[in-house]
């Protein structure tokens, strides 16, 4: 009887521990928030070519703004400060959007594209298939899938266009913070 009681107590404790654990999206969000205010240098690890507009340019991400349900990460390509990744969280589901601006701060005609995770994902990876807004704005990108990974050493931003050869990955070393560039185009605190 004692062994059986101990077994049920252990089983209950095990189930309770797992039922109380954070979802992957929550763990991912908190890890990303831990980088708030920091900047990191990156390198293209897939998809670069000699004529690529990113070739030979310094790549910097800056986890600039961390609100409760929105994290904004400007992505600088040399002197081009037009890109900001915007992640939002609602009901433990994350969304990735791309905010593109001109040098005068006005929105680019191709902006706010991206996607929403279909589930809470894992603590180290979140996947964002193209949403309807993206399909309407950029029809050829309707098969885009973006994913972001985070581990103890790096942050990666990835793109794959299903059914084509389009692939892009940039990896940032999060063990070595770098100087933060000036504000991105159109940024208002």
Image: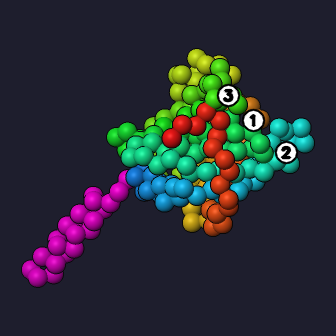
Identity of the residue drawn at 77% across and 42% down: 79
The residue positioned farthest toward the right in the image shown: 50
Q: Which mark is residue 166?
A: 1
For the residues labelled 2 and 1, the Cα–Cα distance comes to 16 Å
Q: Nearer the viewer, mark 3 or mark 2?
A: 3
Q: Position of residue 27 (x, y in %)?
A: 43, 56
Q: Nearer the viewer, residue 6 or 26?
A: 26
- Which SS does the magenta portion mostly show? helix
| Residue contact between numbered discs 3 and 1, judged by CB atoms under 8 Å | no
The residue located at (27%, 58%) in the rendering is: 19
Range covered by the magenta-colored residues = 1-23
Q: Residue drawn at (75%, 53%), measured in percent from left and top?
A: 43
Residue 17 in view, yes or no: yes
Residue at point 61% right, 51% down?
A: 62
Q: In the rendered image, which residue does mark 2 sit on?
A: 55
The label nearer to you, 3 versus 1, is: 3
Q: How is this picture coloured?
A: rainbow
User: Is residue 13 inside the magenta stretch?
Assistant: yes
Measured along the vertical axis of the image, is residue 26 above or below residue 17? Answer: above
Question: Where is 158 relative to 41, above or below?
Answer: above
Residue that carries the numbered disc 3 in the rendered image: 104
Viewer can see residue 160: no
Q: Which mark is residue 144?
A: none
Measuring from the top left, give residue 165's x and y in whole percent: 77, 35
Is 62 in front, or is 7? Answer: 62
Tell me which label, 2 or 1, sits earlier in the chain.
Answer: 2
Mark 3 and mark 2: span between their CA atoms? 24 Å
User: Which quadrant holds residue 47?
Assistant: top right
Q: Secondary structure at mark 1?
A: loop
Q: CA distance from mark 3 to mark 1?
A: 30 Å
- Nearer the camera: disc 2 or disc 1: 2
From the image, which quarter does the N terminus lie in? bottom left
């Amino acid at each position: 009887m004692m062994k059986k009681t101990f077994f049920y107590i252990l089983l209950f404790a095990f189930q309770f521990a797992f039922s109380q654990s954070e979802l992957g999206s929550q763990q991912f969000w908190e890890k990303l928030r831990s980088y708030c205010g920091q900047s990191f240098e990156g390198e293209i690890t897939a998809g670069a070519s000699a004529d690529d507009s990113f070739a030979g340019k310094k790549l910097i991400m800056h986890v600039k703004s961390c609100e409760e349900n929105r994290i904004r990460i400007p992505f600088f390509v040399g002197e081009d400060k037009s890109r900001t990744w915007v992640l939002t969280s609602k009901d433990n589901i994350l969304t990735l959007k791309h905010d593109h601006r001109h040098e005068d701060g006005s929105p680019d005609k191709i902006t706010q594209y991206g996607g929403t995770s279909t589930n809470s994902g894992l603590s180290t990876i979140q996947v964002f298939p193209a949403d309807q807004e993206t399909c309407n704005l950029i029809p050829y990108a309707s098969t885009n899938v973006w994913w972001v990974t985070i581990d103890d050493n790096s942050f990666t931003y990835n793109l794959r266009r299903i059914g084509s050869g389009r692939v892009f990955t940039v990896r940032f070393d999060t063990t070595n913070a770098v100087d933060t560039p000036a504000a991105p185009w159109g940024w208002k605190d």
